[in-house]
Image: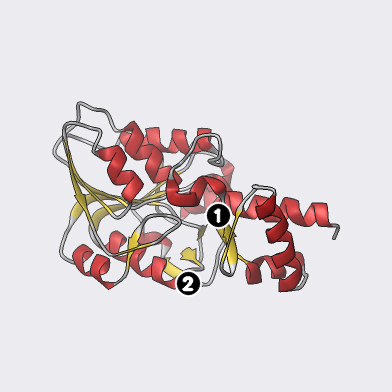
Amino acid sequence: MLKAERHRVILNEVAIHNRILLTDISEVLNVSVDTVRRDVTQLDAEKKLQKVHGGAIALGYVNNTGEHDKVYALNEKGQIAKKALGLLENGNVIIIHGGTTCLELARMIPSNISLTCFTLSLPVAVELCKKPKLEVIMIGGTMAKESQIASGGSAIHDLMNIKVDYSFIGTGYVDVNFGLTEFDYESVQVKRAVVNASKTPVLLTISEKLNSRNRYKTCELNDIAVMITELDPTNEKLREFRDSGIKIY
């Protein structure tokens, strides 16, 4: 495979999943990890992604600022956020986990709705604090430098002691048979706790992540009550998910 084609694949994988491992991409491309490392180093120098230990992250995910000129599929993520707003009512208690789609949801919450909002994401908390009728509660823990999302035992312990109406999470990978998965084990533990802390867990995901999977399981698909994508719920790409019994918005 030519270098230009490898770069295209790497940038596409980073854009869709926000973060990638060199070992995973080497398997996809069928080249050595050293080759992928050199490719990622070049793409980092060209400011097309950011190289991190063992992998790379999308520029729109760096510090999770969600700069609009860098966020992949921003229009689709905005559509997902608008659909998610339809679930909310005055007085709800919710969790918004983190990531670019969750950040769009935080931005779009109307200023006239009253909610209690837990979050593990510093950027999400900042957006929520701009809304006068929201009570914002930050769940603390070890803060990831890139995503600015709290993790670790402290965050999980706090989540075990609450039960909210809705939790909103994203995922790196989702598959009908394998459920929600990630390549980061610690991230999986926190997301699992977010799901368990909610009466109605809601997955926010762009359709390009459908039918993909990675190493560590967050939860089974049927642990999620609602899945929201940018697609019309009747879209053929969602047929297997509809057949599984999950609500599709």
Residue 216: which numbered mark, if any?
2
Residue 162 found in image quarter: bottom left
Q: Secondary structure at mark 2?
A: strand
Residue 132 image position (x, y, % from top left): 18, 31
**Crowd rating for badge 1 (residues with CA inside 10 Å; few <14, some 14–19, many 20+):** some
Any part of residue 10 in sight: yes
* Image coloring type: secondary structure
Task: From this view, report whether residue 246 is shown above or below residue 101.
Answer: below
Q: Quadrant of the N terminus?
A: bottom right
Task: From this view, report whether residue 234 is shown above or below residue 159.
Answer: above
Q: Is residue 107 left or right of residue 12?
A: left
Foreground label between 1 and 2: 1
Residue pictured at 16% horizontal, 33% vertical: 133
**Crowd rating for badge 2 (residues with CA inside 10 Å; few <14, some 14–19, many 20+):** some
Residue pictured at 48% horizontal, 65% vertical: 181
Q: Which residue is mark 1?
A: 17
Task: From this view, report whether residue 205 is shown above or below residue 6.
Answer: above
Residue 32 found in image quarter: bottom right
Q: Nearer the viewer, residue 2 or 62?
A: 62
Q: CA distance from mark 1 to mark 2?
A: 15 Å
Q: Secondary structure at mark 1?
A: helix
Residue 159 image position (x, y, % from top left): 22, 63
Q: Is residue 43 left or right of residue 142?
A: right
Q: Residue furthest front?
A: 45
Residue 117 image position (x, y, % from top left): 21, 45
Q: Is residue 43 left or right of residue 161?
A: right
Indicate which disc, 1 or 2, sits on the residue closer to the N terminus.
Answer: 1
Q: Amino acid at mark 2?
A: Tyr
Q: Quadrant of the C terminus?
A: top left
Residue 17 image position (x, y, % from top left): 55, 54
